[in-house]
Image: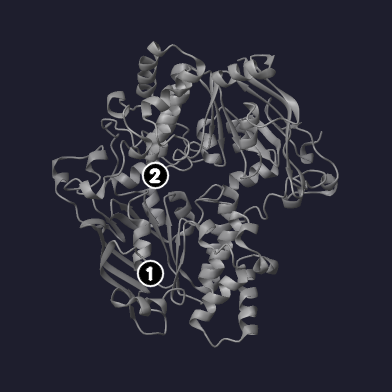
């Protein structure tokens, strides 16, 4: 499988009162065509910033983003990338324009992309059909007339009209109820299969990542600390942080949760950035910053000094 | 053991439509009861009505009796607003869903806790109140300096801990926590659940934990009650409900939970959404979404005992085994 997107040493810095916050601090990641890739971590770990930086929605301080092997430089390349890789967000109540009808919301991307008007109606109907929203019933409605799940379906339909190769989904179901959540996941998975879409799934819920993803990348304080085959990473974590995330999924078997909170990204700990909270830290952890080491299966790697050969 | 809380026939109406419809609950001292269900099923309304905190447009009926250990019974349903002020925080506390927004943004944390204490103990000495606040912050695992902070200076997890400290300030025997971890990520959620468990053990608190997330309730509660469209459709000990649900709604909810190490196949989703209380179907309210619905479901099933300590509101309960669900016509929820 070729890489839909290739991210190399990507860094994003935000100025804060306490200094420069390194929201992304050198992330390297490949997202293959047709693949469901999970990006998991706590709030504030940089997973949403990564998604935004991949589409050039926040400026990168360093590093490169490539699509289909070509580095993305300049406005034209960025526009082409954003056509080909779309994004849906967590809150279906805030992402849809309340003053526009469903048909206009879904058609918006076609307008922006300059698709001839004559094609709009058919493409909008097809996209709504694909997400299970009967066009004749929903086209004329406004967002306030829809439930949360229906809104998220509309948001998905709006990404489909340009027939993208990939969709970045930023916590797309975390605000939805359990029964609606599984409906939306079905929609996404069916699309993924039918259109051979690549999905990049951002979530803090490892049980969801386990169920959906082919591969996952675990982020902590702006870095990827572990990545590999989803089952391999979750069933045999190489990094104590991943283990803590697995243990935190309710109902918990391991009783003691990971203590503390994410440190300030403007004031990163020396050495391994996880060492102040790590239950397994040892002598070198407070001064040696670990790169990714091989952990088990090929392609499975973790940034922990316990794995240093 | 005698009950701490007895609720019978609790009904809440909005313009004549029942949003909570004949809810019966009992809770023993020190027991943790989980109230599960999706948005709009009436679980938060139930919580608010136990504290008589409903907005004026909602009318509540039904008996609510609280028996605080060593004190006289309090008939909450008959209390006036003034009378309720002596009950709230002192006997029953509520940890709100939006902990982020429930704290006063312009008062330091210690002042907010102090005002809760002073409301019930107006003659408490300043030094004693101060000592209590420090002790409370310690109990919920916060450093003393948090007392001098404002809400915006705290993280989501810290604010939720402050809310819990506030709830404990007047040593109530019952704490109701409405989605206390919903806005938090998994690590913070695990910390808060751990804290609630520890407080229960140390203070002998009874707890009503409200959540849409059955797996959160599974690890924290002794018993759970599943609500659907304003009614309790199933109750029982948490382990028994999880291993052998007795209502199709509970069964389908459990099937849709991803379990690490379990099947990776997505369960068939429950079609559609819950009914609008103004337009509820006659008979079983889950009928339009139920793969097992039959003619008799047009009559409303009562919540009845189907096994030891187990009740379900389904004509077909007890369910020995669950047949493969028949796919109901898909309607986007």
At 45% from the left and 28% from the top, the residue drawn is: A156
Closest to the observer: B62 or B174? Answer: B62
Q: CA distance from mark 1 to mark 2?
A: 30 Å
The mark nearer the N terminus, 1 or 2, is 1
- Residue lying at the far front in this picture: please name it: A99
The circle on residue B51 is 1
| Crowd class of label 2 (few under 14; some 14 to 19; many from 20; radius 10 Å) | many
Determine which quarter of the picture holds residue A101: top left
Determine which quarter of the picture holds residue A104: top left
Image coordinates of residue B23 in percent, x first then y, are 27, 62
Total marks shown come to 2
Image coordinates of residue A81 in percent, x first then y, are 60, 19
> Which chain is mark 2 on?
B
Q: In this image, B286 relative to B294: left or right?
A: right
Q: Which residue is mark 2?
A: B254
At 37% from the left and 24% from the top, the residue drawn is: A128
The answer to whether residue A16 is visible is yes
């Amino acid at each position: 499988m070729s890489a839909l997107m290739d991210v190399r040493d990507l860094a994003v810095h935000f100025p804060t009162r306490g200094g420069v916050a390194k929201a992304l601090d050198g992330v390297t990641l490949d997202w293959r065509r047709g693949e469901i890739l999970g990006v998991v971590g706590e709030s504030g770990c940089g997973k949403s910033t990564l998604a935004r930086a991949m589409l050039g929605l926040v400026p990168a301080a360093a590093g490169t983003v490539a699509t289909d092997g070509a580095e993305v430089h300049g406005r034209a390349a960025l526009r082409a990338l954003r056509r080909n890789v779309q994004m849906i967000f967590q809150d279906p109540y805030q992402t849809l324009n309340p003053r526009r009808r469903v048909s206009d919301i879904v058609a918006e991307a076609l307008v922006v992309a300059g698709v001839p008007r004559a094609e709009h109606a058919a493409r909008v109907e097809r996209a709504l059909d694909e997400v299970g929203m009967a066009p004749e019933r929903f086209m004329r409605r406004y967002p306030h007339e829809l439930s949360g799940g229906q809104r998220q379906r509309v948001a998905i339909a709006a990404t489909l009209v340009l027939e993208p190769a990939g969709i970045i989904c930023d916590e797309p179901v975390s605000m939805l109820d359990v029964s609606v959540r599984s409906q939306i996941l079905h929609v996404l998975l069916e699309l993924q299969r039918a259109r051979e879409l690549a999905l990049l799934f951002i979530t803090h819920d490892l049980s969801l990542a386990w169920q959906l993803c082919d591969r996952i990348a675990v982020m902590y304080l702006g870095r990827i600390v572990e990545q590999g085959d989803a089952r391999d990473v979750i069933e045999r974590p190489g990094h104590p942080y991943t283990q803590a995330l697995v243990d935190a999924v309710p109902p918990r078997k391991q009783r003691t949760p990971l203590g503390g909170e994410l440190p300030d990204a403007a004031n990163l700990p020396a050495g391994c950035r996880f060492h102040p909270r790590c239950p397994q830290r040892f002598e070198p952890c407070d001064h040696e910053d670990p790169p990714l080491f091989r952990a088990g299966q090929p392609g499975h790697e973790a940034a922990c000094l316990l794995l240093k050969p | 053991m005698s009950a701490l809380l007895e609720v019978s026939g609790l009904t809440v109406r909005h313009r004549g439509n029942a949003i909570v419809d004949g809810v019966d609950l009992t809770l023993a001292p020190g027991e943790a009861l989980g109230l599960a269900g999706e948005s709009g099923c009436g679980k938060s309304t139930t919580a608010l009505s136990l504290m008589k905190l409903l907005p004026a447009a909602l009318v509540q009926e039904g008996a609510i009796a609280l028996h605080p250990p060593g004190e006289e019974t309090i008939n909450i349903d008959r209390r006036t607003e003034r009378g309720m002020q002596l009950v709230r925080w002192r006997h029953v506390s509520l940890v709100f869903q939006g902990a982020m927004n429930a704290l006063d943004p312009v008062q330091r944390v210690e002042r907010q806790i102090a005002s809760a204490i002073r409301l019930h103990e107006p003659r408490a000495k300043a030094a004693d109140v101060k000592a209590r606040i420090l002790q409370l912050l310690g109990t919920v695992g916060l450093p003393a300096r948090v007392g001098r902070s404002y809400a915006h200076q705290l993280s989501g997890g810290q604010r939720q801990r402050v809310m819990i400290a506030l709830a404990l300030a007047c040593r109530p025997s019952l704490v109701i926590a409405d989605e206390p971890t919903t806005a938090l990520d998994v690590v913070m959620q695990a910390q808060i659940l751990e804290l609630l468990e520890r407080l229960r053990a140390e203070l002998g608190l009874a707890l009503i934990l409200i959540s849409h997330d059955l797996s959160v309730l599974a690890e924290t509660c002794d018993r759970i009650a599943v609500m659907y469209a304003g009614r309790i459709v199933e109750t029982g000990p948490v382990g028994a409900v999880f291993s052998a649900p007795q209502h199709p709604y509970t069964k389908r909810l459990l099937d849709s939970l991803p379990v690490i190490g379990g099947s990776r196949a997505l369960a068939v989703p429950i079609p559609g959404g819950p009914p609008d209380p103004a337009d509820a179907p006659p008979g079983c309210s889950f009928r339009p979404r139920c793969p097992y619905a039959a003619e008799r479901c047009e009559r409303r099933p009562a919540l009845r005992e189907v096994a030891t300590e187990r009740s379900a509101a389904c004509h077909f309960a007890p369910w020995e085994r669950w047949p493969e669900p028949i796919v109901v016509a898909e309607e986007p929820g």
